[in-house]
Image (spheres, rainbow, N blue to C red):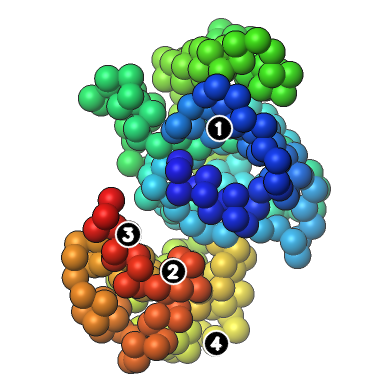
Amino acid sequence: MKDYLQSHIIKKYLPNPMILSGLKKYMNSSGWEDFYIGNHLLFSHRKTYYSTGMFPEKLHSHVFFEMDIYMEGSISYISDNQEMLPHKNDIMLFPPGCQHTARLLEPGHYERYVFYFSPQFFADMGMTEFPAFFSQIHACFHHIRPDAYPTFCYLLEHLKHTLTQLEQDATLSAFSDVLQLFHLITVSSEPNSTRIMDIPANVRELREYVDQYFKTLQTVNEIAQHFYYSREYVSKIFRQYYNLPLSEYLMIQKINYAKALLTEGKSVTCACSSCGFHSMSSFINAFRKRTGITPSEYKKKKKNN
């Protein structure tokens, strides 16, 4: 969570955070408070009004877990070529590396509780394996069983109250609530399979084609021609589900592959050519635009880590 915190201090957080022993509170420029509990976990309660043109979610992934508890809003969650339609208090878990996004279906308020936490959160407790619910490699969509529902709601509200009121021993109390919530979700939740739909085949095929051939593909026109569609059509249907231009998804796949090569110790020249860039300048500009640093700086940072 250290990298996430540092990037948000620069881009998203307002000045003058509240810092206590084991607890940090930052006001996000989007209108909610982010609480860092210890070194490896973030919690926030987010309620925001979104219109169709201003919804910021895009297909993305993290190096940490994301767990969302849905409360309100005309939205769906998309991951692994499936669309999940939540009810209040449904739980979505996106493991590290799992691509996902939320999709705004109608303008309105979108409310959810969000937990971001690194794998180190469990390792610090001496656990050599993740709890069952958190050991999945694909997105999980669960609901709490009726017998555990009152306890689940109480723990969630108590955690929010503890952090917003910052009472005595808030850090210890917050850790207690989080651990009880995680345990309850592990032992008392069930898959919500009846609320899952497959992404339309034509949209899924576009993404799978880019995933397979991104190293050699250069433009959206090439993708459209392969499927005998117009450029406008493939761009429209892809953005409809993933909130992301198809051209940007292609570039993200290239940059993610380049990051993996640089992490392995490959040269910047090798990463550039392996991802299908025809010039070093275009590679460096594309890399910096999406990571904030140059490929050389990224490679050096990974080597020092």
Check disc 1 and report the residue beneath it. Answer: 36
Please determine whether, in this image, residue 35 is positioned above or below residue 303: above
Check disc 3 and report the residue beneath it. Answer: 301
Check disc 4 and report the residue beneath it. Answer: 230
Location of residue 91 (image quadrant): top right
Q: How many residues crowd mark 1 within 10 Å: few (<14), some (14–19), many (20+)?
A: many
Location of residue 51 (image quadrant): bottom right
Q: Is tag 4's residue or tag 3's residue first in the polypeptide sequence?
A: 4
| Mark 2–mark 3 CB contact (< 8 Å) | yes
Local secondary structure at mark 2: loop
Residue drawn at 77 percent across, 53 percent down: 50
In front: mark 3 or mark 1?
A: 3
Residue 154 percent location from the top left of the image: 65, 12
Local secondary structure at mark 4: loop
Q: Is tag 4's residue or tag 1's residue first in the polypeptide sequence?
A: 1
Q: How many residues crowd mark 2 within 10 Å: few (<14), some (14–19), many (20+)?
A: some
The amino acid on which the numbered mark 2 sits, given as a three-letter code, is: Ile
In front: mark 2 or mark 4?
A: 2
Residue drawn at 45 percent across, 32 percent down: 39
Location of residue 260 (image quadrant): bottom left
Q: Which mark is residue 293?
A: 2
Q: Is tag 2's residue or tag 3's residue first in the polypeptide sequence?
A: 2
